[in-house]
Image: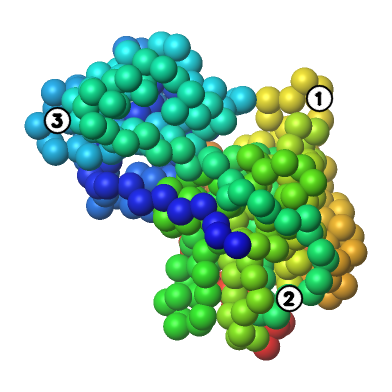
Amino acid sequence: MQITTVNLEAPYLLYLGDCPDMHHAKTGAGIAYWRPERCAGQMCLPGCPVDLGLAEMSIQDAIDAGVRTVVVGVAPMGGRIPAQWLPQLCELAEAGINVAAGLHTRLNSLPPLVAAATKGKATLTDARVPPADLPVGTGRLRTGKRVLMVGTDCAVGKKYSALALHRELERRDIKSSFRATGQTGIMIAGEGIPIDAVVADFISGAAEVLSPDNVDDHWDVIEGQGSLLNPSYSGVSLGLLHGSQPNAIVLCHDVARLKIDESGGDYPIPELDEVIDDVLRMARRIRHDCFCAGLSVNTSSLSDFDRDNYLSKMQDHLGIPCVDPIAIGMTPIANFLLKYTS
């Protein structure tokens, strides 16, 4: 069974359109952070407030800079390409620049873009296309070890935490693989399965395919999707949890997030020990000894002093390592993970 692979030609132009905030620009932000050497610049529509710290480019700038692929760096709710983005994307494709996206709208379903790409001999790449013929999950326990990122909500740092933990394991020469489950992770890693594009009956089976049997000392670091707390996306989270069969979970949280984002109701995020207990209760239905290896928190809204104070208090309260994966790194969580699975 094959997984989704993408091979994007660098350098990239990250397209932001009229993205309203960094929250929705997580694809572009992720690529800019983890693959900066591949990024030549960014392109926005007038009035866009988002800045990834890259050079702002016009279409002519992109051509002059030798840009090979424009990557749609926005993940709007519903995953559709707005009509106001099409003129610029078409002009780029007509100029011979490839277009890549990870949205539910398939690039090849947009006739103007297809015509422009044909004229410019550019390729259209959709990263959010799952492999064909995925199986139903079997529940068979697999060899090797797995750690899954789970979240208190969407867009709270699951991908960043997984990539940072994988980088820490690699630094120690520990056998490990980053397993991408979303479009941004797939474009960063070059392969994975877009779990949220899989038909519901096959989500756990897709997770089994993504993380197959392996040698006993190999770790799969699995990017999470959605949240069991989010009424819109809890289904994909539970299927991924059961199919991943994790030996351990890492809870990811944004300290500024007090309630579920973009929800039609008022759903406060519970106390974090309650969230951990709920996730472990579900995880242990499949792997009875699953444990929480740490709390990974986006503390970018806090001062350094307040960040350190918050993480210290949470660590005392929860009894597990509590870190910011960007400001502090994942060393404490890696130590805890390896200690309790050796």
Residue 61 badge: none
Residue 63 badge: 3
204 is higher (above) or lower (below) than 263: below
Kind of residue at disc 3: Ile
Q: Residue at x 61, y 25 (%)?
A: 78
Label pair 1/2, CB-CB below 8 angstroms: no
Residue 150 spot, x, y in % from top left: 69, 53
Mark pair 2, 3: CA separation: 48 Å
Residue 142 badge: 2
Q: Secondary structure at mark 2?
A: loop
Kind of residue at disc 1: Asp
Binning the other alpha carbons within 10 Å of mark 3 as few (below 14), some (14 to 19) or many (20 upward) gives some
Residue closer to the observer: 109 or 148: 109
Mark 1 sits on what residue? 266
The reply to whether residue 258 is visible in this rendering is yes
Q: Secondary structure at mark 3?
A: helix
Total label count?
A: 3
The reply to whether residue 339 is visible in this rendering is no
User: Which is nearer the N-term, disc 3 or disc 1?
Assistant: 3
User: Which is nearer the N-term, disc 1 or disc 2?
Assistant: 2
Q: Which quarter of the figure is the N terminus placed in?
A: bottom right
Q: Residue at x 66, y 51 (%)?
A: 133
Q: Secondary structure at mark 1?
A: loop
